[in-house]
Amino acid sequence: LLRPLVEEVRKGNLSTLGKRIQHRFVRRINGLRYLLAGPHIIDHEYSRAGGKPFTIPTPSNDHLMITSTELIKELMSAPHQTLSLHAVAKEMLQPKFTMYGFEWQDQRGVEGTGFVRALRSLLTSHLPQFQPDLDRIIRLALEDELKTTGSDGFARAQLFPMIKRIVTRVNCFVFFGEELSNNGEFTEAALELPQTIIQTAELLRVSPAFLRPLVTAIATRRHRASRILFRYLEPVVKERLAKRCAADQHAAKQDVPADCMQWLIDTSPRKDPWSPSRMIGEIMAIWFSSVHQLAMTATFVVEDLCLHREYMEPLRQEVESFAPEGSVHTARLDVSKLTLLDSFVKESIRCSNADAISCRRKALQTYVFRDGSRVEKDDWVCIPQRAMMRDAQRYSDPDKFDGFRFANANGLLRLGQTTDKVPDKDPSTITTATVEWPIWGLGNTACPGRFYASLVMKLLVTQILTEWECETPDTTQRHMIWRSSIVPREGTVGLFRKRASSQ
Ligand code: HEM
């Protein structure tokens, strides 16, 4: 709060100082409401702004919200040294404290962007090989989670905690391989880490600097989860780094494991190689990105399946029509053909978006858009995606859950017709990153894990469809709000019963 004022004093700009103090102070106090009502405040201001940019105060800074295609394109082409995604992540997650002392750069790409190749290219291209294993892990995890049934034949499960565990299991497999993914202590720490990071970072954002080490030690239980992961990963990473170095020296090709940890090592800098602990810090940061959003989004999708049961039969029929002959097993199913499922998952994201904003960038220096909109240094600029996805100008009947909205719209767009169902001008799928569908971010920084995330969500839903009947008695309050996040409630229960045909 005080930093901008101190800067004003330094500049000797005393005439405007009084006004600025008052303005900043009032905005920061007003901004406190954002903590508990962020998405609602954004929705309200969006409808008042009539397509123009608008500013939302938060307790720490202002967020400039932009919605026009021109401004969004300008945002995407602005230099990373000016409008930075990494600086946002650093502010939100406080990695220096929450990730065991791991320091991030403010600017993306300073130490290479190998992780994009590791996830966007290598992980994505290996998805067909991974699919049978992902399918098996999800199936066994569901059976394990839902093994205790009541007298009515239904197993009861708290959906969000269950899906966090399932996502952790599959992600552990693709990140760290079979052995570590079967290690209970390791997977428990892998599940704990993202939750600890988020909770601790929030505490740190409201703690004075001198208390931060103490707050971190208490909230992370002296980095319990990080230390366990580190203990397991250190010998493996050391060995793999040494092997890479030896292979480079002898220009030899060697058999290497096919997992994300290996690809992150392979794509890390060669000229000035990272130490094992630096490498583990990088892996943990990417690990965090892989669990948190996916678990929340997948939970809302499963909740929507339980709530809108009329979609189960048509979705089932679609899965069965594409299943390899004579089986309903989803291991080798070509999920890209399941256009109704793609549409259902997309509609779930449109209606129950886990984040009210996307494409956050922090201004490392003041930036003025071509239309004159200003983002002051240290403020953020964002896209208010939830409000845009509920705008009747973009989506007809936006408050209605229309599971096949996108499939129907794609059908019309493919015929060269127009539709008011969606704002898209061309057919699209869930992973298409466009101005109309910014849930993955945009441009160079668009989520490199989106193809994997989409596959996991679809496999989870197809497993439930083919093996289970599901419903939920909890139909009212499905989420809680913190800042712009819309987090599934831990207590929402799903009822699951094995389908007669799958027993
Ligand atoms: C439903 C799940 C997910 C959602 C909604 C999501 C969304 C996003 C968004 C909005 C961004 C910021 C992009 C920008 O602002 O331009 C992002 C970045 C990122 N995501 Fe995801 N993500 C998901 C799953 C995953 C998974 C499973 C992984 C890893 C396997 C992953 C890895 C990353 C990484 C590494 C970045 C940083 C990209 C960069 O700095 O260039 N995400 N994601």
Image (cartoon, helix red, strand yellow):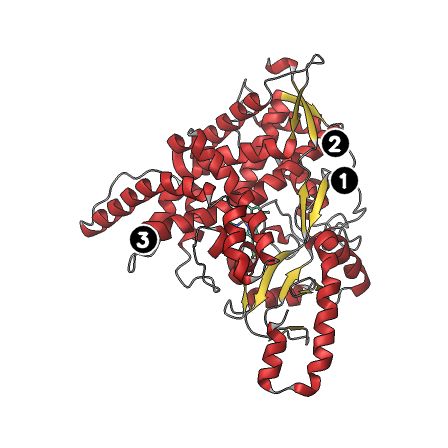
* Image mark for residue 275: 3
* Location of mark 1 (residue): 401
Give me the residue at 68% from left, 62% from top. 59
Evaluate if marks 2 and 3 touch, with contact meaning CB atoms under 8 Å apart: no
| Amino acid type shown at disc 3 | Ser
The quadrant of the rendering that contains the C terminus is top right
Give the number of callouts: 3
For mark 2, give the secondary structure.
Answer: helix
Element on which disc 1 rests: loop
Label 2 to label 1, Cα distance in Å? 10 Å
In the drawing, what numbered circle is on residue 307? 2
| Residue type at tag 1 | Phe
Q: Nearer the viewer, mark 1 or mark 3?
A: 3
Q: Position of residue 8 (x, y in %)?
A: 62, 81
Residue 271, quarter of picture: bottom left
Q: What's under tag 2, amino acid-wise?
A: Leu
How far separated are the C-alphas under marks 1 and 3? 50 Å
Residue 124 visible, this angle: no
Q: Secondary structure at mark 3?
A: loop
